[in-house]
Image (cartoon, rainbow, N blue to C red):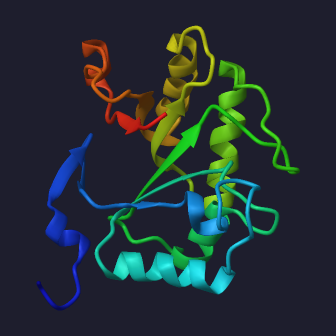
Amino acid sequence: MTSGTITAESSGTWRLGDLPVRRLGLGAMRLTGSAAFHLGTPGDRGRSLAVLRRAVELGVDHIDTAAFYFSSRRSANELINTALAPYADDLVIAVKVGPYRDWSGEWGTSARPEDLRAHVEENLRQLGRDHLDLVYLRRMRQESVAEHFGALAVLREKGLIRHLGPLVWIMPGSRAPAPHLAALSSVARAPP
């Protein structure tokens, strides 16, 4: 057994578009409480800030978050902003857009293409940033994502987004995503 501190650097690196990142990152969903979203007990703010700072100290250079990660008391994006701003140049923030929750925590309908600018701007506001490094479109009952990616591509052209990627649900034993997705910067795989 190895003694000492294990760092994210020991996990190796991969490329997210033109961004080199370590294989070990931090998912922010549970920073706000004991259970996802408005369920469970809100987490301790000081502990959440300490976790974020310690993760970066240990070499984590990318964080996955979303504006819809919040509890009755706090938002994951606000915690990230408070703990880590001003952001290190090599820290990559990846956000999900598509679904949304109202302030009571209830899920709304999936975003239409014309709604996505507001989703991006809300993440920018909460994070205190002028651009998002990576935006994942989380599919939720959309018939086609072509119009959604078209709307996000316009925001990329305006400099609000650097890279786009889909969040693809891969079932155990299923094949990799379709080849046409290979041109995207990143494909996030999450269990159902």
Which residue is at a point 70% across and 48% down the rendered structure image?
122
Q: Is residue 73 above or below residue 49?
A: above
| Number of callouts | 0
Residue 175: x and y in percent read: 25, 19
* Position of the N terminus by quadrant: bottom left
Which residue is at a point 38% across and 64% down the rendered structure image?
91
- Camera-nearest residue between 141 and 34: 34
Q: Quadrant of residue 11?
A: bottom left
Q: Is residue 52 left or right of residue 92?
A: right
Which residue is at a point 57% across and 13% down the rendered structure image?
147
Q: Is residue 82 left or right of residue 75?
A: left
Q: Is residue 101 above or below residue 57?
A: above
Q: Is residue 163 above or below residue 104?
A: above
Residue 191: x and y in percent read: 43, 37
**Can residue 128 be seen here?**
no
Residue 90: x and y in percent read: 32, 64
